[in-house]
Image (tube, grey):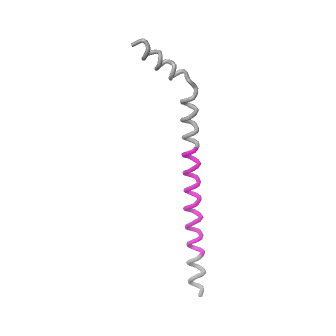
Amino acid sequence: MNYVKSLIVNFVKQEDGPTAVEYAIMLALIVLVCIGSVIAIGESARETFDFVANIF
């Protein structure tokens, strides 16, 4: 039982876990910004093509 307790204490004290979580959160935010940008650019491009198509 003491072995399990020491494993848990060591896991909580390690810095690797929080660092990995921070990187995962940053990656998720970057992905969301990229997806939002692609959607915004795609809608703008569609509106431009629709406008040009209606001229002719």
Q: In which quarter of the image is the N terminus?
A: top left
Q: Which of 30 and 2 is in front in this view?
A: 2
Toward the bottom, the furthest residue is: 56
Q: What is the x, y in percent for residue 56?
A: 59, 87
- Assess whether residue 19 is covered by the magenta stretch: no
Quarter of the view holding residue 35: bottom right
Q: Relative to 46, does residue 40 appear above or below in the rendering? A: above
Quarter of the view holding residue 25: top right
Q: Relative to 1, does residue 54 appear above or below in the rendering? A: below
Highlighted magenta segment, given as a residue range? 27-48
Toward the left, the furthest residue is: 1
* Residue at 55 percent of width and 57 percent of height: 36
Q: Which of 43 and 9 is in front in this view?
A: 9
Q: Which of 9 and 1 is in front in this view?
A: 1
* Residue at 59 percent of width and 64 percent of height: 41
Q: What is the x, y in percent for residue 46?
A: 56, 72
